[in-house]
Amino acid sequence: MELNQLTAHELLAKLKSGLVNFNAIRDSLYTRIQNIDSKVNAYVRSGGAKKSDSKADPQGMLNGLPITIKDNICTEGLNTECCSKILQGFCPPYDATVISKLKKCGAEIFSLKANMDEFAFGSSTENSYFGPTHNPWNLECVPGGSSGGSAAAVSCDEAIWALGSDTGGSIRQPASFCAVVGLKPTYGRVSRFGLIAFASSLDQIGPITKDVQDAAILTQIISGYDPNDSTSVNKDVPDYTKSLTNDIKGLKIGIPKEYFIEGLDPEVKSITEEAINKLKTLGASVSQVSLPHTEYAVPVYYIIATAEASSNLARFDGVQYGYRAKSDNLVQMYKQTRAEGFGDEAKRRIILGTFALSHGYYDAYYLRALKVRTLIKQDFEQVFSDFDCIVAPTSPTAAFKIGERTSDPLKMYLSDIYTISVNLAGIPAISIPCGFTKNTLPVGLQIAAGAFNEEMLFRVAHTFEQNTQWHKLKPRL
Amino acid sequence: MKYQTVIGLEVHLQLSTKTKAFCGCVIDFGKAPNSCVCPVCLGFPGTLPVYNMEALNLAIKVALAFNCQIQEYTKFDRKNYFYPDLPKNYQISQYDLPLSRNGHLYIYSENKPKRIGITRIHLEEDAGKLIHEAEHSLVDFNRTGIPLIEIVSDPVLNSPLEAFDYLTNLKSIVQYLDVSDCDMEKGSLRCDANISLRPEGAEELGVKTELKNMNSFKGVKDALSFEVKRQTELLKNNDPMIQETRLWDAEKGVTVSMRSKEGAKDYRYFPDPDLAPFYINQPMVERLRAQLPELPQEKMRRFMSNYSLSEYDAKILVSSKEDAQFAEGCIQGYLGKDKKVMVNWLIGPLLSEANLRKVKLNELNISKDELISLIGFVERGDISGLAAKGVLNQMIDSGKTAQTLIKEGNLLQVSDTAELEKIIEVVVTENVKSVGDFKSGKTNALMFLVGQVMKKSSGKANPKVVGELIKRRLTDA
């Protein structure tokens, strides 16, 4: 096995014993990238592939192990453009808090950034200014999105592990499409400072890894209160590796009936049911639960997320940084810059959000959506007062073809139907590989728990993983 | 028909905190453009605002000083609009849950107290400054993010003069709190006005005009006076009134239409998801209330009762914190029976010297002990009151003591009877008619004779002694 094919914890053991050196790991990644990334397009600006990486502190626990970062997380001295033309050339003079934490632990920030849907707007990584990422399991398919670059890179060993961001499923859905592990932490668990905001009340940074143990290690590193993010929560970070017990006996797992409805692909349904059966055989008790407001999640999400996005993206105006269109007056400059700088999906969401916040519509849309959001949150609280976690499909289908849904935004939005409630409720959820369709496309299993109960996710996910082989399968490229 | 003027004022005050409202930038007005900035106040992608507790504390103190109710639950909202001085293209402000409401202050227009309700006081961030040059405009972001409070009065001011008095009182209170420069020329205090007219006795408010661009209290008064005239004309001629924003042109002394209501902006306010709602608990309010200094109103009442000052005198002395402090020191240090003597010195010669020099009493370069010493010379009859005023002037200019100046100027009054009697003899012989008048009972004649002696002694004769001597001389004969 090549070094780039190993998990982070495997490599850390080797680094620690001095068997390998981090330069060798980096070289193996570059070789892999040079060989296959022209097909996958997991990385952006790969023209600079030989550029030297930021200096890591090999003394830290990560010993110089490289990590791949989504293009919307600020990395000092490395362009961070959210895969948008409007941020062309933007090179932040600061690190996101998660990046500082990683550097402090001795990680090497990989100089190539992972591809994504522009500003994380999308479920397929087709909305990237740098072109779509292809699913390593089937190059004609999307890798999911918006963290499609991160998920694809990890799945085909172009990365050891990666960071993504999840606003409505942007870590979990691509993880499920690419047969890797993806976690969205509890809102407030991980600092958002330095994450270029899509929807501030929903965004969280999280790990995309080859197995659950790596996810636990990485979550541990990036979690914790940050005085630079007043929405981060001052709560101790437990040792997540202690949750990797391979034991779920006696746990009470709920299956939300509202998730097994029309639109759920029959193959995905049966694979999910098999996985649930597996959990039963491992000693968990499983019963059906109800999340009665589930049907409102998609409309509520698209009102809140677009409203916040419309305001968050107002700063991209050509004045201080990024792309600026040539024009002789200010208003024209604003208009041209934004017309030329944003892609179609970004424009669509800015218009939707602007409308939802407009005078006369605010109460009917935004305010109402906030109220329903509270109801959705209460649905989960209700369930978690009786159950340890809930299990469901991550996405209603496996990866779809590139171009298949681009002309139908509503259909695209439904890719996230099972993931967005979790963001609205602010709770954590993980997606782990749980099987493949007949066409060898991966299917992911989603596990969600109460706020700040990431330990439960690691425990259940790890147990499932230890007793299945899905995570060991690699795409052939 | 007679019309009643209805005015409401919106005052913006920069709070003099050490650092900006939502980032750690030190506020320093002397610095070069764009040197007091950081990624947060520049609105760089990925950055997040963090509360400055000092700004919140000062804002609450102001609210308490204006007798507002502090809201237990407050939040920050985004006010969305595009402008190059606003790096995020939204301003962090407070919309429907301001930190305080329902306050008041008293003004003394035409010597009658009037209670002016304060609708709300809220906290927000300042925008940057545009510098327009011939070919282009420049932006200075040093001011961006400085904490501002907005004080909104009820529409209960009924004349431009009342508006002026309101502003003067407001400024005085804020200066007592020592939370803002209150310098309208420097822009640390800004004022917009809403004005409408209605038929005398009517309940319903007329169509209002919003006035902007006034840069002094006098400018506010003048702009309002112009509007009263303009609107009265329109109403008298039955011309249509439209709701609009008008700009004051101080040079031409007119207001000019800027935009009508149809052109009004939709700011699409919504709660800022980057800042968690804020709870202000009672202990915090009480702690801040305990820190409030004695405010002008209380000080005035105390001066009246402790030092038996008239309301008029007390009001003058408390109008500025510095003046009041200096005055109180002098009044306490003055051991004479009648404090009024000292008060007359303070609000008479001292204040006129201070006004002449555009400084506060404490900046006159004269200590309370020196002032008391000067008054002592007058009271002992060593110098005349008139001469003392001259000495005061010289003391301020030269910094020399009263004693030195009186000596140098040879100003000691002549009370030596022998010397005075010689002069009296001359005067009596030269003014036979007046002597006759006095003898026939016309007491006014005595004053004339004393005056003649004063003249001949170049003002140095002690008039009291002279009067006695003349009386004795003429009655004895």
Image (spheres, coloured by chain):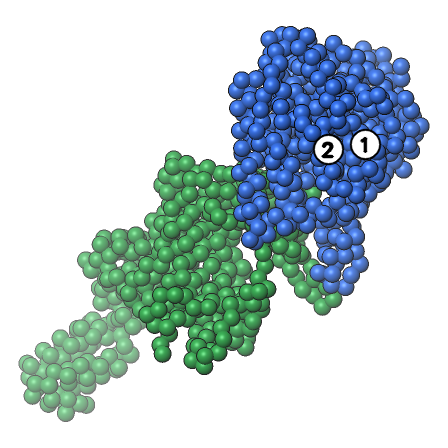
Chain colours: A blue, B green
* In this rendering, position of residue A137 left or right of residue A369: right
Q: Quadrant of residue A196?
A: top right
Tag 2 near tag 1, CB within 8 Å:
yes
Which mark is on residue A415? Answer: 2
* In this rendering, position of residue B165 left or right of residue A379: left
Q: Counting other residues with Cα less than 10 Å from the Cα at mark 2, is it few (<14), some (14-19), or many (20 or more)?
A: many
Task: Say which element carries label 2.
Answer: helix
In the image, A119 versus B460, the foreground residue is: A119
* Residue A21 on image: x %, y %: 85, 18
State how far apart marks 2 and 1 are (Cα). Answer: 10 Å
Q: Counting other residues with Cα less than 10 Å from the Cα at mark 1, is it few (<14), some (14-19), or many (20 or more)?
A: some
Tell me the subunit letter for badge 1.
A
**In the image, are marks 2 and 1 on the same chain?**
yes
Q: Amino acid at mark 1?
A: Phe
**Residue in the picture at 29% in, 79% down:** B458
> Is residue A374 among the parts visible in the rendering?
yes
Tell me the subunit letter for badge 2.
A
* In this rendering, position of residue B44 left or right of residue B275: right
**Residue in the picture at 32% in, 63% down:** B108
* Residue B426 on image: x %, y %: 19, 86
* Residue B282 on image: x %, y %: 38, 37
Instruction: Write down the residue under mark 1.
Output: A400
Q: Which quadrant does the N terminus of chain A fall into?
A: top right
Q: Residue furthest right?
A: A35
Task: Say which element carries label 1.
Answer: loop
Q: Amino acid at mark 2?
A: Ser
* Residue A161 on image: x %, y %: 78, 24
